[in-house]
Amino acid sequence: MSSLVAVGMAIAISGCSGDDETASDPGSEATLTVLAASSLTESFDELAEQFESGHPGITVDISYGSSSTLATQVIDGAPADVLATASPGSIEPVVDEGLTEGEPEVFATNSAAIVAPGDNPAGLATLDDLADEDVKVAVCVDTAPCGSVAADLFAEAKLDITPVTQEVDVKSVLSKVTTGEVDAGVVYKTDLLAAGDEVYEVEIPQGISVTTEYLIATLTEAPELDVAQEFVNLVTSSEGQSLLTEAGFELP
């Protein structure tokens, strides 16, 4: 009898162990797809690493680009779990289409910055210098948040500036500057800090300040909705906010 009981217990334990292993396999590996404004690149790359380390089996796949372009991709049906944009206007069409889970959350702000190549070949000293017809200036396209920031900056400074190029996103503007293709570009404070010695900062006069708000939301068609919300929670947590402020963002 004791032998039969022992065998029965062994079978039961073996069966339970097998069931647990089988149950843990489905969903143990998944990809979280995040669409984010290009100015978030350095910060979100670091947040993704933190998220993956705390969620074994989850891979965070981030696509960076112009906020308006990413929003259009979501509306057109691109599969994604999270959307983070660099302006309220960029994410608004997605909300209007009913494609976000609730209202997007403002999680950071960013300020305009003017950068020249590290050796400042044009000898730029002030914001007014950008109005010189010989100075080549790069900005973002009007539809991108960084393009609106540049337009607002020039309007507030009462400057008439004709850019030689309008780039799809802020990282493209920064690239034009660091490669010396232009004399100056309008980017964000975070891009200025990330570029380090590759750029020279042209000071914006006190009293002139142009900022933009960053918003994040989970998407209604998210294949990994629960995990998506956990990523949003990390971005808006004290840990995420601390990382963002270290990169030059400001709290909302």
Image (spheres, rainbow, N blue to C red):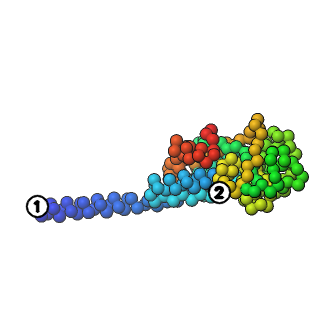
Picture coordinates of residue 3, whole percent (x, y)? 12, 64
How packed mark 2 is, by other alpha carbons closer than 10 Å (few <14, some 14-19, many 20 or more), is many
Tell me which residue sits at (61%, 54%) in the image.
42
Q: Earlier in the sequence, mark 1 or mark 2?
A: 1
Residue 94 visible to the viewer: no
Give the position of the N terminus as an image quadrant.
bottom left
Q: Nearer the viewer, residue 231 or 112?
A: 112
Q: Amino acid at mark 1?
A: Ser
Picture coordinates of residue 169, whole percent (x, y)? 72, 55
Q: Secondary structure at mark 1?
A: helix
Q: Amino acid at mark 2?
A: Tyr
Tell me which residue sits at (38%, 59%) in the image.
23
State the separation of the CA atoms marked 1 and 2: 65 Å
Say whether residue 76 is left or right of residue 4: right
Q: Which residue is mark 2?
A: 64
Give the position of the C terminus as an image quadrant.
top right
Picture coordinates of residue 230, whole percent (x, y)? 50, 48
Say whether residue 132 is left or right of residue 53: right
Tell me which residue sits at (19%, 60%) in the image.
9
Q: Which residue is mark 1?
A: 2
Picture coordinates of residue 86, whole percent (x, y)? 67, 47
Q: Nearer the viewer, mark 1 or mark 2?
A: 2
